[in-house]
Image (spheres, rainbow, N blue to C red):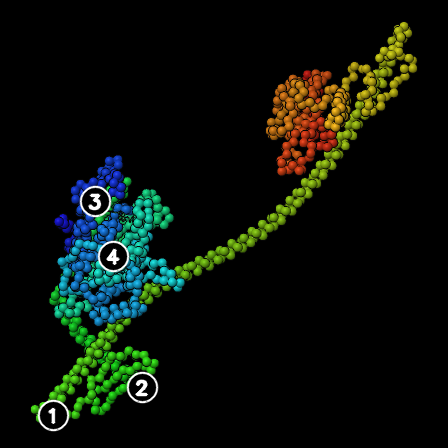
Amino acid sequence: MRPQRTPMKPPRKPGQRHPNAPTDPVEVCARIRNLTNKNDESCIDVINDTTIRLTSSDNRVTECQFYKVFNQNVGQQHLFHYVAEHMVNDLVQGKSGLLFTYGVTSSGKTYTMTGTLEEPGFLPRCLDMLFNSVQGVQASKYVFVPDCMNTFCVQTEAEALLEKQERDILPQLSTPKTPSKSRSKIPDVRYELEHCQSENINPDCRYAVFVSYVEIYNDYIYDLLGEVQLDPFNRPRPPQSKRLREDKSKNMFVYGVTQVEVKSTEEAFAAFQQGQERRRIAHTQLNAESSRSHSIFNIRLVQAPLDPLGEDLLQEKSLICASQLSLVDLAGSERMARTGAGGERLREAGNINSSLMTLRRCLEQLRENQKNGTCEMVKYRNSKLTHLFKSYFEGHGRVKMVVCLNPNAQEYDENTHVVQFAEMAQQVEVARQEVFKIDRENVKRKALEAKTRAEEEKKRHLTAARQLSQEATSHRLHRGRFKHITSSSESDTTTVTPSTTDDGESDGWEGIDFNIGSSFPNLEVIDPMDCDTIPSIISFLQDRMDMMNSVKKSARSLGSMFRTNLTSNSQNDKDLQLRLKDCENELSTKSKDLAKMERQVKKLESKNQVLSRTTQVFEKDKKQLQDQLCEAEIQLKNSQLETKKVETKLRGTVANTKAQIEKQCEKRVRNVQTEMHQKMWVKDEQLRQLKHIFTDGREPRTGREGRPVTRRNLTPLPPATPTSSDSSRPRLGHKRRSRSAENLLKETKSLNKSRHISNSDNDLRQQKTKKKSSSTSVAPVEPAAPLAPKHRRSKSGANGQWLAHLPSTTVPTETIMQPCIKPNRVVNVPSPKDVAGANKYLLTHQREDKHGEIETQLVKGEVFRTRTGGQQVQFVDIETLKQRDPKTKKQISPKKRKSNTSVDELSSGEQSSWTDVETRCSYGITSAGSTKFAGKKKK
Ligand SMILES: Nc1ncnc2c1ncn2[C@@H]1O[C@H](COP(=O)(O)OP(=O)(O)OP(=O)(O)O)[C@@H](O)[C@H]1O
């Protein structure tokens, strides 16, 4: 038993048709599907047949009440019986209805609406019930003709027949309303359904069923039954979206949608299948066949009363009733994070959710208006879905919703949102529609009016036909194309027999005969009892009457043909005019767009020109700058070369000047020395002579060196010549005489020279020895002892107190060949104290050679105590450690390790580097008390 509901009386919304009309609430039923996996946890409990309880995993509980709750065990038939059967009944009675399924994705909306072959849903069941109901009272096909403004008109059986012929026999002439070609491909689907039919059929009416199928995808409406348009390359064009319009009765409809007249459930379902194939369905994480659009399948039932005789349908438009049942399968609301959607799916999901949100907002606003008696604007236009349903919510039919729920515990949050929406929706009231009733009196009156009109029309047509035939006759006579014309003074009528054209084609007048027979016979009745003449006159008249009737029939058919053509032409004309208007509108918008785009293109072109000009200027500047750079580089190179030249020149000049000054200094020193020697000698001699005078010749006269002094020796000594061999001459034994810094330097130089000679001698000797040892078995020759024992050859491993001077900037190169010196002390900057505590000095110096490689020089020196008590370091050896990149091996000089390089050699060959080392590392200690380091410049 269906639960009885008393209609509530909420405040009326302005704009409703009948302010005092009863209302019905939006009827919401809940259907809980079975768990996908039986082991899954369920979050929904059915408390009773109207209440459910939702429990979250953290024990939050929500209870909701619905008009009816269907648990997992409820089958499709049962559900149809409770929810949709009533709506088909309403449909038959001329009331419209909206039935939609709502829920999250994969909750069973499509299953409930369409179902499967084994378990058909609402849609096939509604169709089946409807066709069962209208069986026997269906009008012939094409009697009801839909127009483009959502209304219908009725045409005669003859007109319908003609249209049928047009569509079936001449498909090329038919309007593209019925995509019969594509529909024929759809397999014939047959359901095994329980018989069910409505009892509210009116036998005095004739019915026709039309179906249309649209989808709302990304907020665009697409016709799913329309002809597929082909492009010039015979490829299907992408579907064009449709617009929404409001008809005279304020019903929203899809303008230009294809309405297919169907005569059976199979035909209707074939149309549905055809649309279904075009519908956008995609695979998502939560549903293998997820609907990506809202689908709306409209079943329109058109009915019109028969005339009082029950023969013909009344063509009066006001007597035609068209009711509609919209079966809507909404796309599922989904959380994008859960579906893992991306790209197109994400966009679809966004549009689905936003349209569902608009639906929710509209219903909320409606409810608020009804509760508070306000008339706030409901924003139906925010989405195509709500805009299309507007008429239902404003009282043009009953609204029912089936909320589909997936009991899986993971769906708790989404289910909560859905049930909240459903609870809110069932508080909205919609005005109840009236049943379509036929007023018999009205029908009679209309039928009479129609008859009179028809007769008048008939007359008009006859006249028109007669005129037409006369015109045709005269025309044909004029052209001489008639095969046979009989016209005599004896004849009462003109007999026109249509002919064919010269080329044998029919001219369209075939079968139309206006001959009413031969002329009246010349008979005279003299006797009223004349049994010969009177029967012949009667038979003649009878014949003529028959002839007249046949002519009338021909004229009528001609008239009806003419009328049909006229109607269809006027219909076509209207359609064409509408299309023309649309095209004009489209054209104007497109031309506006075009003008706009042209303006934009012009702007962009001008911008482009400016940019290209700027680019050219920049390129010119760039070229100029590059040229300038090249010139500057060349100048720089030249100036560098010049600087180098000048530097070399200056170095030479400096060295020369230095040498000259040193020479001069030495000369002066020698002169002074000689002078001093002479003076001292004179003084000595004077003293000796004085002593001799005092001792009076008792002691033998001896010189300073103990030599006997003769008188001849008293002559002053000649001044010493400043030669380089001064140092090798026997020194004058004067202890007070101090050696000047210049003398020390000179001595160092000479010593280094001799050391170098000895070292090179030693090397030569060693080489010779090696050669000899390799060629002969002669014992190696002992190397000669160094000339100056303190200037011995580099002995890396020699013992001693080594002070390693390792500047902090030294790079560890880890050269394979390393000196085997174990320094006792390593310092970054040596102090006089450090030097005092060592007798060997090792300086590590690094530089970049001409190949760009690091060259490490180990400069070795010996520490001497000076007479004044300070320390002096005398450099005795340089070892060069080189490291080469294997790639640049060819450029490497064969001499990898360079040792025994004398200071002089370095000073001549690598003057700058040596100067650098010497400048940085050669220190002399000049005073005894306070040890002082002084940079020593190379001579
Ligand atoms: N009550 C039910 N009994 C049996 N199977 C069901 C039921 N409800 C749903 N299913 C099955 O669950 C799957 C998903 O259902 P359906 O496609 O109807 O979900 P939907 O809500 O329409 O999803 P979407 O919004 O993504 O289109 C289908 O395979 C369907 O057969």
Give the CA separation, mark 3 to mark 1: 96 Å
Tell which residue pokes out farthest to the right in this image.
712
Q: Residue at x 26, y 87 (%)?
A: 485
Q: Position of residue 421 (x, y in %)?
A: 24, 46
Task: Give whichever of 600, 309 is nearer the camera.
Answer: 309
Q: Amino acid at mark 1?
A: Val
Pointer 2 residue Cβ closer than 8 Å to ligand 1: no
Question: Which residue is denoted by mark 3 in the rendering?
Answer: 72
Q: Quadrant of residue 691?
A: top right
Tell which residue pokes out farthest to the bottom in this image.
526
Pointer 4 residue Cβ closer than 8 Å to ligand 1: no
Question: Which residue is denoted by mark 1 in the rendering?
Answer: 525
Element type where label 3 sits in the image: loop
Task: Give whichever of 565, 882 is nearer the camera.
Answer: 882
Q: Residues within 10 Å of mark 3 (few under 14, many from 20)?
A: some
Q: Earlier in the sequence, mark 1 or mark 4?
A: 4
Q: Position of residue 505 (x, y in %)?
A: 32, 79
Q: Earlier in the sequence, mark 1 or mark 2?
A: 2
Question: Which residue is denoted by mark 4 in the rendering?
Answer: 189
Question: Which residue is denoted by mark 2 in the rendering?
Answer: 480
Q: Amino acid at mark 3?
A: Gln
The image shows residue 705, relative to residue 669, as above or below, that is above
Pointer 3 residue Cβ closer than 8 Å to ligand 1: yes
